[in-house]
Image: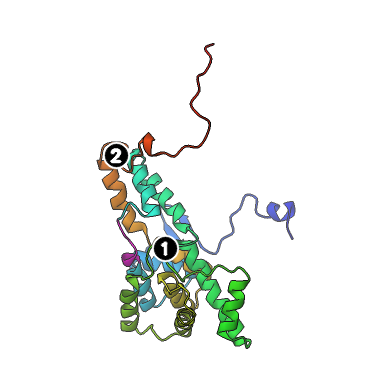
Amino acid sequence: MSGPHTLAEHVGVLRTKMGAAFPGQRAVFRGHDLHRDLKDLDWFSLCAFGIFGRHVPREHIQLMSTVHVYTSYPDARLWNNRVAALAGTTRSTPNLAISAAQAISEATIYGRGNEFRALDFFLKTQQALDAGTSLPDYLEHFLRSGGRLAGYGRPISTSDERMPLTLALAAKLGLSHGPYLKLAYDIDRYFESTGRQLRMNLSSLLSAFAADFGWTPREFNLLVHSAFLAGMYPCYLEAADKPPGATFPTPCRDVVYEGSPARDWPAR
């Protein structure tokens, strides 16, 4: 049922299975006492517990937490870091600067929206293979149908310096033999054999791990949305320490303008 009757049932009350705060007494987090039962969790593990509603295996946490380190580049030229830096040069507050930078980190091609689609693609591809479709047939049909393949290809560079590090850690943690990781490499090898410049990137690698861990696209997206965060802080701070407007200033002579020519306004 939808409409006003559904809304009326929720007026004046919050029904939740997630938790509640009882000021001066305790806080409940996913059915557990936050300060008693969960006090020994590190911050990233608590985030994962909030997302999944269960304790995520230590190896999975370590892999994804370390990937946050591998992806935190303090380069203000990167699209989301640029927003943090520009906010710093205009003397915005740190919270607004980082929130704005985080908001555009969901870029479809190379941001967090990419992993969401890549994980969904792996799940659907495996379903097709289980139904008897060959991998080449499925991939070619997907591309002919206008599908946009997330997780393969990379802007600027065809190689990804983070992948060897991630794979080495996964092997050390015993996580490098999952079926979806194999599928990701099967897809990579197929594209290489056809001469397409669609090589596997970090997004597809992490999405394959997420599929092997049994995570949904939404769960995965929630866990890794902060992967660029640590690199944003230095970009904001450096821009804020420079003279106002000194980060990426654009002289008028560098602006290409094709609109109406300069004109005089009549005096009133």
Residue 104 at what x, y percent from top left? 46, 53
The magenta stretch spans residue 147: no
Q: Earlier in the sequence, mark 2 or mark 1?
A: 1
Using the rendered view, name the quadrant where residue 225 is placed.
Answer: bottom left
Which residue does the numbered mark 1 point to in the structure image?
155
Secondary element type, mark 1: loop
Is residue 239 visible in the rendered image? The answer is yes
Which residue is at 38% across, 34% downward?
Answer: 252
Q: Nearer the viewer, residue 47 or 27?
A: 47
Using the rendered view, name the quadrant where residue 61 is placed.
Answer: bottom left
Residue 114 at what x, y percent from top left? 48, 65
The residue sitting at the top extreme is 268
Which residue is at 47% across, 70% downward?
Answer: 151
Which residue does the numbered mark 2 point to in the structure image?
246
Q: Quadrant of the C terminus?
A: top right
Start and end of the magenta stretch? 68-74
Secondary element type, mark 2: loop
